[in-house]
Amino acid sequence: MSLARNSTKGITGYLYFDSESFIQEIEGVEADVAALYRSICSDGRHEGIRTVLAQDSETRVFGEWTMAFHDGDKDGGLLQKTFGSRAPASLDESDGEQILRFLRNLSIGSAEIIPVAQTDPLTEA
């Protein structure tokens, strides 16, 4: 359901998950991203949600996918190797740019990814 909703709204991005945490980059029109974020925050299955980076961009980084997915349980602790033992519990806004680089590196093949749904890159960010 969320993939279909994201696709109709033009939401793209990247989701990293390991047995303890999610890290997600969400791209799209600001109002649609804000609505999705509110929905995620109000979902009782999620806790400890925080924004570590919010920015406007002319282009999408992850526009090839509706939402790509990386299974962090299969990468040998890449999140902890990158951010140390403090990850993810104490990642905050000061780590935002590094987290975005982490996700970008995953998307260009530094680790296996599973493209969940293909979509044409959108010209409107």
Image: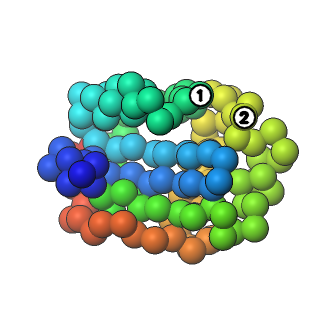
Q: Label 2 near label 1: C-beta < 8 Å?
A: yes
The residue lying at 36 percent from left, 57 percent from top is 67
Query: What is the x, y in percent for residue 44?
Result: 44, 29
Q: Is residue 121 left or right of residue 90?
A: left
Q: Quadrant of residue 19?
A: bottom right
| Residue on which disc 1 sits | 48
Q: Quadrant of the C terminus?
A: top left
Picture coordinates of residue 111, whole percent (x, y): 61, 71
**Residue at position x 39%, y 25% from top?**
42
Horizontally, residue 103 falls left or right of residue 92, namely: left
Q: Amino acid at mark 2?
A: Ala
User: Is residue 16 shown left or right of residue 75?
Assistant: left
For residue 104, which quarter of the picture? bottom right
**As drawn, is 33 to the left or to the right of 23?**
left
> How many tags in the picture?
2
Mark 1 crowdedness (10 Å alpha carbons): few <14, some 14-19, many ≥20? few
Image location (x, y in percent) of residue 13: 39, 52
Amino acid type, mark 1: Gly
Residue visible at 70% across and 40% down in the picture: 88
Q: Nearer the viewer, residue 100 or 9?
A: 9
Q: Secondary structure at mark 2?
A: loop
Confirm whether residue 63 shows in the render.
no
Q: Is residue 46 above or below residue 15?
A: above
The mark that comes first in sequence, 1 or 2, is 1
Q: Position of residue 40 (x, y in %)?
A: 39, 33
* Circle 1 SS class: loop
Of the numbered discs in the image, which one, if any, rests on residue 89? 2
Residue plotted at (62% across, 45% down)? 21
The circle on residue 21 is: none
Mark 2 crowdedness (10 Å alpha carbons): few <14, some 14-19, many ≥20: few
